[in-house]
Image (cartoon, rainbow, N blue to C red):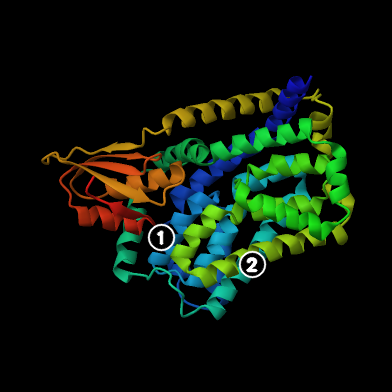
Amino acid sequence: MYLQHFFQSLWGIINEMSPYILLGFIIAGFLHVFVKPSAMTRHLAGGGLKPVVKAALFGIPLPLCSCGVLPTAVALRRQGASKGATTSFLIATPQTGVDSIAATYSLLGLPFAILRPVAALAGAVLGGFSVDRFNRNGDGSQPVDDNRSCNASAAADDEYRGMSIGRKIIEAVRYGLVDMVGSVGKWLVIGLIVAALITVLVPDQLFVNLSRYPLLAMGVMILVAVPMYICATGSIPIALSLMLKGLSPGVAFVLLMAGPAANFASVMILSRAMGRKATMMYVGAVVVTAVGFGLLIDMLLPASWFVPGAMHGATCHGAHTDVSIFATACSALLAALLIYTSIKFRGHGHAHNHNINEIEMERKYRISGMACPHCQATVTKAISALEGVKSVSVDLASGIATVTGNVNDDAVSKAVYDAGFNVEDSNL
């Protein structure tokens, strides 16, 4: 009985989300291919409120989870972005994304889909402006190298230069449906499974009692969300299941905002890249805006706006009687992509081959900071762009990059650094 209820709940949630998730991934691919990193860097340099707001607006549609956004933000910082703008980008990006906004609309409705990017914008501006205003002198963050800035931006822009529009469109779809699915797929599956387990196993009365004390419930949710780590899209089915068990919409909103942005791994890496004081402001901005908007939802906005009625039958009663052929096809396609990318990115790395007639030498490098297939692909592309490289294979699990060709260690270290990572050992 429990097993049947579990699979019915899981299938109902997947059918509601899959068309929107696939659309979001494709849009994400177009953003990746057609938005130049150098253009972002130019807009994010300098002090004041303007770069902070721009960074938030750049980050909101980008579908990067916190493990993927960290090297991107570090690279932006090294390329000349201000510390305030970098902090703003770090807050806004993992909390939203075109894929998660579309999925939020599919499961939780239009008010949630609107409030989520609005809250991300508010938190990003608050955190970025605080860092820019009160942490200008820094506290141990990594310095910016202007020479690296020019080289890194140019290398990133060259990736799709010279491609025809048709080839760029194909590459955008490939990136969205392969690289992006590989990047967030693990966390999406975890979120779906956790949501179905909550629906089946958690007693309804548990969260009804907790919802009587909103601030306590939000505090508990932050304590749970921070170590749990879940991506912006993966957090949606969990929030839905908690609401259907009696948790208030405001407390569920805290999970949606705090979970993707403020986890232990992100905080540790951010402290190293931005400094302790900036990191405290980052976490404070995430918590304050999540709780503030959560209280706004519970106390000031109509409760009828936040009733996930479309999924009530599917998750509570295990009966979803009106599933369209299109939704089923999208679910099947999403499942196939998840299986394919899990096999493709499982410890085998990416390999890029170049027809260069050089003496073939193989070197191995231990690289720190990689956390997902997006990071893996970024490192691979950065090294592959070097002159003399014949092939590159990056193993995500071990952090080892194997480089074949005629290239020196300094050039590899510089390329990896420009991409937002570090070579810890080049004598393997």
Q: Is residue 272 above or below residue 47?
A: above
Q: Position of residue 268 (x, y in %)?
A: 50, 58
Determine the secondary structure under disc 1: helix
Query: Which residue occupies 39% across, 40% down?
Result: 396
Query: Is residue 165 shown to the viewer in this render?
Result: yes
Q: Is residue 181 left or right of residue 358?
A: right
The kind of residue tagged 2 is Gly
User: Which numbered disc, 2 or 1, marks the residue that appears first in the sequence?
Assistant: 1
Q: Which residue, given by chain and number where applicable, does mark 2 sit on?
A: 284
Q: Position of residue 290 (x, y in %)?
A: 71, 60
Front-most of residues 113 and 169:
113
- Point out the image quarter for the N terminus: top right
- Which dot marks residue 75? 1
- Which dot marks residue 334? none
Query: Which residue occupies 79% across, 54% down?
Result: 217
Q: Is residue 211 above or below residue 345?
A: below
Front-most of residues 191 and 48:
191
Residue 420 falls in image quadrant: bottom left
Q: Is residue 331 left or right of residue 405?
A: right
Front-most of residues 289 and 64:
289
Q: Position of residue 343 (x, y in %)?
A: 45, 28
Residue 223 falls in image quadrant: bottom right
The kind of residue tagged 1 is Ala
Query: Which residue occupies 44% across, 69% down?
Result: 81
